Image (cartoon, rainbow, N blue to C red):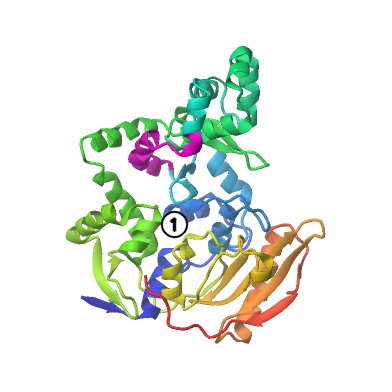
């Protein structure tokens, strides 16, 4: 069995995530570059936090440098769409061809409705059906527009329903989870624009879901899991069963047979990694570079750092999101982006786009052990590039600069 050092595994992982390629010349990144990132990572997480910029823009900046965000908006909002929304990792953007692979998740959601959805059905019978009908007839619509349309089309029923915005929103979110509605994009206020799948997906993609549904009914949904694990294995380069399962939020018990099938076909190879407790799997086409020359501010929601144990095992950095930690208890800050230089995480930057003042605020800066003057120069250049990309005139220096304590024994996924 092949054995990898921690450094080898780290470089393989970085190359698989797109950090081994040179960036386009600043400002020249185009649709092909956007598509290249989509094809590389396979899924991009969405989050509503906007202290810096919406999270889905940041993985593209990390890999491409300054690019036109309107290109990404068009990839999501205009036909033919290169990206559609679904609960793939968390809320996420995925290529349309991946959407049907979640047929089993959509089917399960119809049976295992969460508490809020059960209350809507019990307290407002007929509301879900009316919401779906409005979206089909009038979509794309935001939840507020659906509410207004219902008030217009069903005034008597609405009095009896006693519905409100949250009930309509819960109905829409359940319909979205079950695949009965999709998203035609987002408004400037980041509101999802709901539409039926046939109005969003390329021709034939919605119909393809029935193929996976039939397989699911026949007990063959393992084929869809196999495809999702195949995507994850390529995007990660190397990872454990837990890493591969986390990429699309799959249960490890259903991922294990898929890994076994990929090993049998030769698509992945079992390996051991220095310091890792569990066996890992190397994708057959993964690049194994001797050097990585990356320079990137990595979003807290970037697929490179999703699985925190994996991040610690690869980089020797214990990284946690502190948004929900009380301010006085935060160690590194509110919205902290690791700074990747070469093949190491050398710093953590708590960043805020102060749009009123026109500056990118580096609120707190933490240097990792072993960082040097070259890392400082690279970070200054990357912050300047990000400020310009966000339309901010300058970088406001850190209010606090600190050094991370020595990291103990790295965790192992």
Observer-nearest residue: 302 or 294?
302
Please provide percent x and percent y for residue 211. 28, 34
Check the image and report above or below for 330 versus 212: below
Residue drawn at x 72%, y 70% as measured from the top left: 363
Q: Which residues are magenta?
A: 96-117
Check the image and report above or below for 123 versus 389: above
Observer-nearest residue: 399 or 171?
171
In the image, is residue 98 part of the stretch drawn in magenta? yes
Q: Quadrant of the N terminus?
A: bottom left
Q: Quadrant of the C terminus?
A: bottom left
Q: Answer left or right for 54 relative to 357.
A: left
Q: Answer left or right for 89 relative to 61.
A: left
Check the image and report above or below for 158 versus 227: above
Please provide percent x and percent y for residue 142. 61, 32
Check the image and report above or below for 130 versus 119: above
In the image, is residue 296 part of the stretch drawn in magenta? no
Residue drawn at x 38%, y 34% as measured from the top left: 205
Main secondary structure type of the part rendered in magenta: helix
On the question of residue 395 being in view, the answer is yes
Please provide percent x and percent y for residue 374. 61, 84
Q: Answer left or right for 191 relative to 117.
A: right
Specify the quadrant of the image occupied by residue 112.
Answer: top left
């Amino acid at each position: 069995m092949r054995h990898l050092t921690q450094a080898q595994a780290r470089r393989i992982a970085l190359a698989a995530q797109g950090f081994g390629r040179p960036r386009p010349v600043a400002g020249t990144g185009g649709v092909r570059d956007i598509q290249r990132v989509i094809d590389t990572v396979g899924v991009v997480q969405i989050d509503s936090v906007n202290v810096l910029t919406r999270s889905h823009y940041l993985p593209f900046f990390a890999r491409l440098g300054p690019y036109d965000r309107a290109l990404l908006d068009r990839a999501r909002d205009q036909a033919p769409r290169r990206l559609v929304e679904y609960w793939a990792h968390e809320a996420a953007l995925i290529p349309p061809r991946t959407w049907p692979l979640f047929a089993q998740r959509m089917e399960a959601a119809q049976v295992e409705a969460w508490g809020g959805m059960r209350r809507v059905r019990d307290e407002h019978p007929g509301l879900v059906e009316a919401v779906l009908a409005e979206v089909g007839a009038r979509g794309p619509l935001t939840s507020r527009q659906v509410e207004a349309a219902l008030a217009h089309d069903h005034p008597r029923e609405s009095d009896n329903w006693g519905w409100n915005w949250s009930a309509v929103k819960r109905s829409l979110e359940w319909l979205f989870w079950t695949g009965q509605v999709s998203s035609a994009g987002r408004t400037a206020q980041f509101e999802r624009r709901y539409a039926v799948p046939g109005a969003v997906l390329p021709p034939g993609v919605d119909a393809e879901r029935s193929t996976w549904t039939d397989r699911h009914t026949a007990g063959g949904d393992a084929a869809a899991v196999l495809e999702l694990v195949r995507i994850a294995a390529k995007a990660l380069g190397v990872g454990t069963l837990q890493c591969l399962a986390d990429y699309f939020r799959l249960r490890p018990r259903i991922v294990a047979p898929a890994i076994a099938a990929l090993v049998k076909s030769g698509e992945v190879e079992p390996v051991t990694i220095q310091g890792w407790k569990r066996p890992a799997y190397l994708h057959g086409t993964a690049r194994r570079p001797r050097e990585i020359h990356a320079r990137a501010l990595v979003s807290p929601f970037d697929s490179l750092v999703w699985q925190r144990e994996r991040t610690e095992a690869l980089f020797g950095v214990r990284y946690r999101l502190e948004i929900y930690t009380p301010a006085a208890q935060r160690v590194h800050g509110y919205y902290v982006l690791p700074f990747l230089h070469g093949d190491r995480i050398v710093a953590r930057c708590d960043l805020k786009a102060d749009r009123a003042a026109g500056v990118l605020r580096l609120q707190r800066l933490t240097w990792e052990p072993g960082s040097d003057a070259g890392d400082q120069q690279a970070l200054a250049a990357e912050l300047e590039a990000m400020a310009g990309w966000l339309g901010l005139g300058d970088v406001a220096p850190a209010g606090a600069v600190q050094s991370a304590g020595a990291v103990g024994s790295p965790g192992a996924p």
